[in-house]
Image (spheres, rainbow, N blue to C red):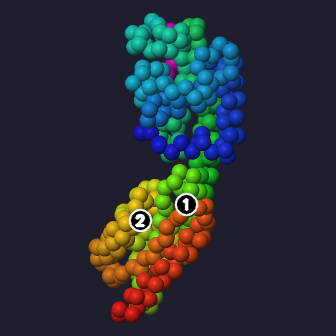
Amino acid sequence: MFKTNQWVFLEKDNQIALHKWQKIVNLMSDLFSAPAGFIVQAIEMGYRVVIASEQKDNPYKAGVVISADTNIFCKKVVQDNRALYVSHASKENYWLDNPEVTEGGFESYLGVPIHWPDGEVFGTLCVMDFAVTDYQRNYIELIKQLRDMVEDDLAMINSFVQMREIAMLDPLTNIYNRRALSLLAQQKLNLANRLGFHVCCLFIDINDFKWVNDNHGHEVGDSALIVLAQTLKNHLRDADIIGRLGGDEFVAVLQISSRDSVKHVTTKIIEGYKIALSEHNLPILSLSIGHSFSDKTKQSFEVLLEKADKDMYKNKQKFKLSK
């Protein structure tokens, strides 16, 4: 139900949207003559106030998270995925354990669900009042129109992120391209230098790949590349960085606790690739894998990559001599 990606509120790019949302919430509260208005996001841990109207009587500020177990108005809106209007909450038994009523003193609530572009519930846009209210239908239509403006922003931001992700991915294998790989790997190296952990770079090349293309066609060759990308995903951790430099050259950047563990990792990749090729009825191919390790000094990813490339080349020559 909940999207774990919280980019909407972490990226500097989206400060414009948040500034606009603040204006929407302030305007809504003024139009309703209400002391509090909010945009609330449903997250795994509960309900987070993303935007709070800026009236001095509003007791809840942006950033507050209310536990998922708490019976609040917004929880009801998210669960039912429909608008909720409560005009006199203290008169309804359902809300007698709602801290917004018992502690906050709110009597009236009007809220509508906000949706992600794919239709999942993002959270709510709502207005709350200490007084009993009698909102007519046009008020409900008004808050829905304001909600639509927020959803338009979510759709625009979502499209921007998707385009940015596409620009970072290799279109064939759906793993990072060289540009993204270099950027992310350098970030990991910088972090390793600050925190003192080790990084290993694997340079992976498919043996006899040209032979596959020449004898079986480029479609089979492309399938072999896709299977290798999936093999790396299956045998490495989510935190590891996997990318394709181009052709049949792949790179993985790993955080490791011991240099001795690399042999085990490369063996898993080599054997896993053979098994995966067999399962897809593709020619069985071997891999040449070189590796390099970060040291305790600040270094560039390109240096690490060059060392791993040279080590791979040595293994490649051994493979050719053994044929």
Q: Quadrant of residue 267?
A: bottom left
> For the residue carrying disc 2, how many other residues have a C-alpha within 10 Å: few (<14), some (14-19), or many (20+)?
few
Q: Which mark is residue 259?
A: 2
Give the x, y percent position of residue 152.
Answer: 62, 41
Q: Which residue is mark 1?
A: 296
Out of 37 and 283, give the one closest to the viewer.
283
Compute the Cα span from label 1 to label 2.
Answer: 14 Å
Check disc 2 and give the amino acid type: Arg
At 62% from the left and 36% from the top, the residue drawn is 150
At 47% from the left and 9% from the top, the residue drawn is 102
Out of 5 and 36, give the one closest to the viewer.
5
Q: Main secondary structure of the magenta part?
A: strand
At 58% from the left and 20% from the top, the residue drawn is 60
- Chain part drawn in magenta: 84-88
Q: Please indicate whether residue 231 sits to the left or right of residue 51 in the image.
A: left
| Label 2: element kind | helix
Q: Is residue 127 above or below residue 187?
A: above
Out of 80 and 39, give the one closest to the viewer.
39
At 50% from the left and 74% from the top, the residue drawn is 308
| Label 1: element kind | loop
